[in-house]
Amino acid sequence: MRKFIIIFIELLFISLVLAESGYKLPPGNIVKIFDTPAIPSIYFIPFGEIGFEITYQKHQNLEQLSDPSEKLAGIELSKKLNAPMDMFPLKYIKIHNLKKNTITTVKLPENIKLRSYRISFDYKKLAITYETETGIKLIIADVSSGKSKIIKGIKINDIFEDTGIFWLNDNKTLLIKSIPENRGKAPKKPLIPNSPIIEETSGKTSTIRTYQNLLKDKFDEILFDYYFTSQLILLDTEKGTSKKIGNSAIYEDIDISPDNKYILLEKIKRPYSCMVPYYYFTKKYEIINMKGNLIKEIYERPLQDQIPIGGTYIGPRRFQWQPLKDASLIWVEALDEGNPKNKVDFRDKVMRFNAPFSDEPEEIFKIKQRYSWIDWSENEDELIYYEYDRDKLWQKGWLFKIGKDKSKLVYDLSINDNYNYPGYLVMKKTKNGYWVFVKNNDYVYFINNKGATPDGNFPYLAKYNFQTKKKKILFKCQENFFETISGFIGKDFHKIVIRSENKKNPPNYFFVDLRNGKKERITNYPNPYPEITNLKKELVTYIRKDSISLSGELYFPANYKKGERLPLVIDAYPEEYTNRITAGQVDSTPNKFINFWGASIKYFVLQGYAVLSRASIPIVGNPETVNETFIEQTVGSVEAAINYLDERGIIDPKRVGITGHSYGAFMVANVLAHSELCAAGIAKSGAYNRALTPFGFQSERRTFWEAKDFYIKVSPFMFAEKIKAPILLIHGEDDDNSGTFPLQSKRFYQALKGNGATARLVILPYEGHGYSARESNLHVLSEMIEWFDKYVKK
């Protein structure tokens, strides 16, 4: 009882603080669900007998977000961490030994904020990074016992969020991107600038999209050097000793060769740019040995600020080591100058450069369309390469053996074809930590954790023979459940782990014996949300006027009675398609456990609304001009949803609210500007004036000057006088997403206000494109519920 009183007083105090600060709270039942800890998840070692259980901190708080930061070259970094803040740090790590049936908790200091972890290749050690007031530091843990030790004297530079730590083959040594010793304090900006900010162009065509948090002046370049520079070191995790490798530099990426004799370095160099993020800056690719000595300069790439829309870099790109070779470097080069509009027989070629890197690189194959990626086989020199046709939104995969002339087509479908998507190849790690796809008696294995069908999603595991084209389903999700495959356990292909859930039961893990279908429970996580278990949910399908099939997830209150007409909230995000068939495919399931995250629109169900979540809004047409009918297809999709639910007697068509985030917010504003279907709208983190995104947006390929009338037509800012329904605009003050800078919402609000509309603008301090702080998310929920209660529910 005493504990309950203390908790109640603490919650009351927090509520008073929030109220005094201007941050609002939604109803208490929503706050309770919002604060419920996240359900754990487990990562299982493929073909092993170990799993790593983790859970995340669901939300930051404003105090954490308000830590001093710098915005440089497209990244907002925490000064104390020398890296972007992890918005969802890990709370703990538990190790499941499936063979011994034991669970070991890694012993860590209390209230530690775990950032990431890497597993040694023999699965005996964990390297864990964690956040402190003085930087990112390192812990080494023993997988068997859970014992851990803090490594002192090393601060990790995770500025590029690649963890900054990399295991070597001996399973005791880490290659680390560290903060240079004796770096000193960060430079202080002079009160008086030493020069104006000047930019100049002459005859240079640069159609780069609008980016945020870019370098602004020469002092920002000094800060960029300070925060982004790393010193590579080798740490012996058993002895605790370390040694430097080479000189400090800005290492965007480092990649160790399979034999551990070489390191591929991707270094950022001056000159920098105030117009593009860091990944477009000048780069040098070079190979060094483990002593830091230069072995080979591969390529120096100039500043990339003239890439065509939909194009790629000129020169070598997409470097990787071939997994089953000691040290063979693979890369891709464009044969069309990186311009998708150039007509060529082949767009890319793939090159290989073998150690000791004294001969010339060899071309191993050419690709007709744009290179996507390679899946390497566990058979040496065998691979599947994938290419992408942007004109058809089509992908092909080719089975190829290096040294052979012919490739075999094994994958050929639209990127939007969910029904025929086979899934991803089952992979395993080599002893050197590289991923390869497995083969067993000429069969490969596919995990399809989507499993889309006209009746909903039913994930499955299949084996497939590329030669005979014979396919066999080994496991498929049962009816009224949603079951995904985590992977094979052991080495005999007889046992898998699945994650199983349904509407009333939270996700839990089970063994499945593929020989007899027998299941064995691994975890027994309780239902964290008993208050929402009885909410009603169904998968609905309906038809648009142009005969395209649409779908969505419909939620009802638990006490809903048939015939009762409810206010409706529609939440949607438009997507582009090239054909009507794939546009109408169902990609959803009614069988997932109902789970709320962040300022989820599903909370409206608890307030007596029907909610249509993931309402499909397909925009169908030629990729070059598909958006010409964006407004007509968007309005038609919303109208179809309302008519369908009205005909079923579920909703009151005069009490409909519509919401969307980012491109969905753009959709909301256009629906309100060009129809009277909705009583009110809520638009979060959107862009409303396409003249401010003149070099394309979403999948739009034309510039403003190539399609002025279109850009104006789809800009709700230009039609502010037509918006009569009340609209709530919400935006993160630090939104760094390309095109959706906060100015979009501010100027749109001014346009609405200037035309007498009913509108409200909420700017969230310290928030980005998505919202991270507990205070912000609860305030957003309160704002949304109050807005629709006032203008929709009535």
Image (spheres, rainbow, N blue to C red):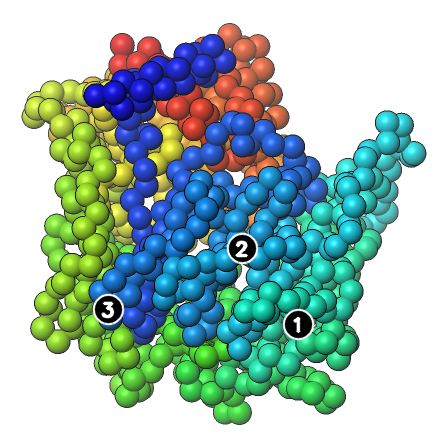
Q: Amino acid at mark 3?
A: Lys
Which residue is at 70% across, 78% downward?
289
515 with respect to 178 (left or right): left
Q: Up-down: is 345 above or below 526?
A: below
Residue 690 rendering spot, x and y as whole percentages: 58, 33
Q: Residue 150, labelled with which disc? A: 2
Q: Are marks 1 and 2 in contact (CB under 8 Å)?
A: no
Residue most extreme to the right = 194
Q: Residue 411, labelled with which disc? A: none
In front of the other: 50 or 507: 50
Instruction: Name which quarter of the figure residue 46 lies in.
Output: bottom left
In front of the other: 658 or 188: 188
Residue beneath disc 3: 100
Instruction: Name which quarter of the figure residue 237 lies in.
Output: bottom right
Residue beneath disc 1: 264
Q: Are marks 3 and 1 in contact (CB under 8 Å)?
A: no
In front of the other: 632 or 386: 386
First reached walking from the N terminus: tag 1 or tag 2: 2
294 with respect to 650 (left or right): right
75 with respect to 121 (left or right): right
Please identify the quadrant where the C terminus is shown.
top left
Q: Up-down: is 726 above or below 661?
A: above
Q: CA distance from mark 1 to mark 2?
A: 29 Å
